[in-house]
Image: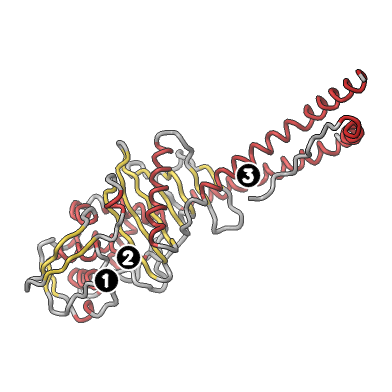
Amino acid sequence: MKLRSRLRSRLRLNFWQKVGGITFWALFLSLSLNLNLSFADDISARAAIVIDSASEKILYAKNPNLKHPPASTTKLITAMVVLDRLNPDSIVTISENAANTPSVSPHLRAGEKFSVKDLLYIALMRSVNSAAVALAEAVAGSEDAFVSMMNDKVSRLGAENTRFMNASGLPGPDQYITAFDLAIIMKKSLGYPLIREVINTRAKEIFSESGRKIFVKNTNQLLWTDDDNLGGKTGYTRAARHCFVCAAKKGQNTLIAAVLGESARDNLWDDSTVLLAKGYEVLTERAEPMIYFSSVDERPVVFASHKAEKRYKSEKHKNAQKAYTIAKKHKNKTHKIDMKANKKNSHVKVTKKKAKKSSGFSVQRQEPMSKS
């Protein structure tokens, strides 16, 4: 009996010495990956990002450079271009073309006159397309000419993966934006005091020059639920789904979150809340920055580098893909080591199997880490 007991103890020791290290690291890597992927699943939108406004560092991102229809988030650039060229107190007459532009209510009538400031309230708070087109025509004479100014503006802002085809965000061919670019545009828009004031207004009464009263309510629901929210811009088309970008004050920092391609409007507020919370955790060093790719086959979470240059350009995406390739090679190498160890320990398993019959001792074989 004593001899048999010693044999069992020796078998346990040899087995765990040779296989235990591999088992531990495989389990550790698998657990870490699964935890990170479960966090990525918290964001159901096609693309999302949260950045630190001051440094423009990426704190968390999902498909940050996925080109996506911008919907009415376009109106942030429209507002900036307008304020670069027009006095907010200037009067604009609504044209037939602007009045007939497909839009949500309230309907603007041809011949009505509004101040630039009031049209910005209507365009940014309620997302009325007619107001955006009227402003574009007031600046450039036509919407097409205004679009050239918009694309020049985003280029100067460093939004390299953005292109507009109209001033409102209505569907248009070859019109796109990325989550990162949208966050940068939001940051730049906060530098305009009037835009900052408008997007932080919950509700307002607007009057035309003839005295018609229009009541507008902000489509940003976070203004009613999050006192830290500084404002934002929503958007929706069938192709773009629901989109949203916002800024919030967290501690001493301003965070900017952008969401593109969410299937349900209510999910925008959940996504944005999660993004802002996770972004603050990274800033306070309670979490690691992450970039997650779901549009490419089986992309895992990749740790984001804060040593990268200030702008998130295409090179950062290449680096993230390179990091994924290295991680995949490491996983394959771990798998080979595991298989090699299994061969070396085949005699141990045979002896262990015999010992199991007499003692009931069992060790479950660790399977190679499966794809997530």
Helix, strand or loop status at disc 1: helix
Q: What residue would you read off at disc 1?
A: 129
User: Which percent across, then down, holds residue 319?
Assistant: 53, 47
CA–CA distance between discs 2 and 1? 8 Å
Tell me which numbered mark, 2 or 1, is placed earlier along the sequence: 2
* Mark closer to the chain start, 2 or 3: 2
The answer to whether mark 3 and mark 1 are in CB contact below 8 A is no
Q: Dot 3: within a 10 Å radius of its alpha carbon, few (fewer than 14), some, or many (20 or more) residues? A: few
| Quarter location, residue 77 | bottom left
The quadrant holding residue 152 is: bottom left
Q: Residue at x 16, y 75 (%)?
A: 94
Q: Marks 2 and 3, how far apart in space?
A: 39 Å
Q: Which residue, given by chain and number where applicable, does mark 2 sit on? A: 72
Instruction: Choose between 308 and 330: the one closer to the eye.
Output: 330
Q: Disc 3 residue type?
A: Ile
In the picture, the disc for residue 326 is 3
